[in-house]
């Protein structure tokens, strides 16, 4: 239906191994949505759209092999980008494993996303690693003004079994890395929607050291 969502189109493409879906209104074809449309519109993470190509082409034939190779490279780039973020959080926040680093990222970034208006949240998510995006898209829309620095610290303490000073360190590390991953203008827009107590999450390491000296 012409009223269905982009995610419905992606699901059909994956299920039917196709790249184009007709839009129907009261039994009449009124348009068409293509995989290229979804790519240009950034309707889903690259790895999810790449899965549509893989499903359509399969493993057979030289063309399928070529496109599968491209898809694998795209997936590898996505994994590498997210992997670098995980490793940096793991090291800088003094966490024991990459799984704990992933939890820290999801708690902190997820809370910030829910504190923003839907439009601002969408802009922020679109600039983050594609492998992180599905988790963030699934969150309830904001702004949720019940989210505070204390609520994030408490969630980190609960999920990671850490204390308050370490929870703040984790928040600051994740915020600093996010600030490095997106455009300066995006960070300014995000900070503009956050209360003062949360804006410091995106301060640079040098600014944090100065403020706590």
Image (tube, grey):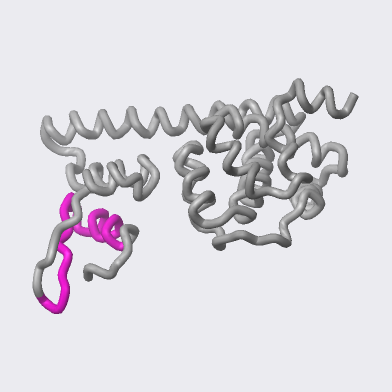
View extreme (top): residue = 206
Please state if 185 lies on the left or on the right of 163 as rendered: left
Q: In the rendered image, is residue 155 in sight?
A: no
Please state if 14 lies on the left or on the right of 122 as rendered: left
Whether residue 114 is in magenta: the answer is no
- Where residue 199 sits, quadrant-wise, is top right
**Rendered location of residue 201, percent (x, y):** 72, 38
Image quarter where the N terminus lies is bottom left
Image quarter where the C terminus lies is top right
Q: Nearer the viewer, residue 129 or 159?
A: 129
The residue at 60%/53% (across/down) is 116
Where 178 sits versus 17, above or below? Answer: above
View extreme (right): residue = 213
Q: Nearer the viewer, residue 96 or 127?
A: 127
Q: In the rendered image, is residue 2 in sight?
A: yes
Please state if 53 lies on the left or on the right of 199 as rendered: left
Residue stretch in magenta: 8-27
**Rendered location of residue 46, percent (x, y):** 36, 40
**Rendered location of residue 12, percent (x, y):** 25, 60
The residue at 37%/41% (across/down) is 47
Please state if 120 lies on the left or on the right of 4 as rendered: right
**Rendered location of residue 177, percent (x, y):** 63, 30
């Amino acid at each position: 239906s012409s009223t269905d969502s982009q995610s419905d189109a992606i699901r059909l493409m994956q299920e039917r191994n196709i790249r184009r879906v007709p839009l129907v209104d009261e039994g009449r074809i009124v348009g068409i949505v293509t995989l290229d449309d979804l790519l240009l519109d950034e309707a889903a993470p690259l790895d999810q759209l790449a899965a549509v190509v893989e499903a359509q082409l399969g493993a057979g034939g030289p063309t399928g092999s070529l496109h599968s190779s491209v898809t694998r490279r795209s997936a590898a780039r996505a994994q590498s980008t997210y992997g670098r973020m995980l490793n940096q959080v793991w090291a800088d926040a003094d966490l024991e494993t990459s799984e704990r680093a992933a939890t820290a990222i999801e708690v902190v970034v997820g809370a910030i996303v829910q504190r923003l208006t839907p439009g601002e949240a969408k802009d922020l998510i679109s600039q983050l690693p594609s492998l992180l995006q599905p988790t963030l898209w699934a969150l309830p829309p904001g702004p949720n003004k019940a989210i505070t620095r204390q609520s994030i610290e408490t969630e980190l303490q609960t999920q990671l079994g850490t204390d308050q000073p370490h929870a703040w360190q984790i928040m600051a590390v994740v915020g600093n890395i996010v600030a490095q991953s997106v455009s300066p203008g995006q960070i300014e827009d995000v900070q503009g929607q956050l209360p003062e107590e949360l804006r410091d999450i995106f301060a640079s390491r040098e600014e944090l050291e100065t403020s706590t000296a």
